[in-house]
Amino acid sequence: MEIVAVPAFSDNYIWLVHDQASGETAVVDPGDATPALAEAERRGWTIGQVWNTHWHPDHTGGNREVKAATGAIISGPAKETIPGIDVRLSEGDEIRLGEHRGRVVEVPGHTLGHIALVFEDEQVAFVGDTLFAMGCGRLFEGTPEQMYRSLQRITALPENTRLYCAHEYTLSNARFVATAEPDNAAIAERLQTVERLRERGEITLPTIVAQERQTNSFVRASTWQQFAELRAAKDSFRS
Ligand SMILES: [Zn+2]
């Protein structure tokens, strides 16, 4: 499985997922069809599926255009309104790309129907706006308790699982968690790494589960109440 980042808008990443064996390609959260279609064409890939993690327009805005251009089948969360949806996904459902099988995990919090897609054979998960590197999505629809549980589910995956988040928020998140856990050496070290990457305009994703367990204060919170305090502090944090 080959996974390619397509930058979109100011800080979104659309992920192109290609299976060499079958030649099949999926696109995750195409908020904007133009860059996704262009990158697929440049690589000689034909998009056959759209996978959406949640309904927000910066994740689904390009759905209909991708479908019109390629005939792609659109799969997304059953509990949300997704443009052009063909397949409604709920907890435990399976998606396939060639011989790769992905499992749907419901991760409410950022939105109520938000899903993550977990490919255990590849140790890969597409987590949308639920978990970010050293951070997490804002609570637009769900409760802190729901989001805390969703983050725990994602970081309970095997520690080498690569997590593909949908935004480049890592630097701001790193600066925040460095204030939340000033004595955490792993955070301090990762902040430096992220600063160097972003100075060069480089991507900081994917992250991996083991790194998030060490450096993501939202994941490391011991209760959902502690998580809720951190989330509220981050909402007003200016880095
Ligand atoms: Zn969102």
Image: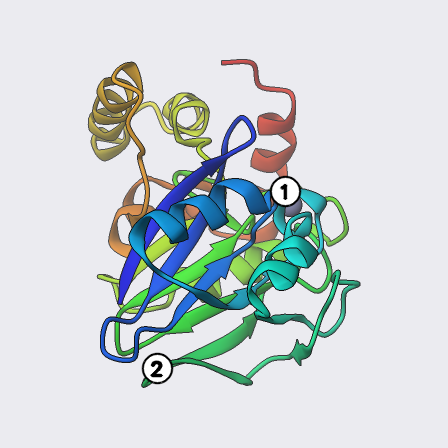
Callout 2: helix, strand or loop? loop
Q: Is residue 86 left or right of residue 151?
A: right
Callout 1: helix, strand or loop? helix
Residue closest to the eye, 102 or 225: 102
Q: Is residue 238 left or right of residue 101?
A: right
Q: Residue at x 36, y 24 (%)?
A: 178
Pick whichever of labels 1 and 2 is earlier in the sequence. Answer: 2
Residue located beneath label 1 in the image: 228
Image height of 27 relative to 180, above or below: below
Q: Which mark is residue 20?
A: none
Q: Residue at x 79, y 63 (%)?
A: 81
Q: Is residue 186 visible?
A: yes
Q: Is mark 2 within 8 Å of ligand 1?
A: no
Q: Can you give x and y, in whole percent of width and height, for residue 40 in the image?
A: 39, 53
Residue located beneath label 2 in the image: 98
State the quadrant of the N terminus.
Answer: bottom left
Q: Can you give x and y, in whole percent of width and height, for residue 97 in the image?
A: 39, 77
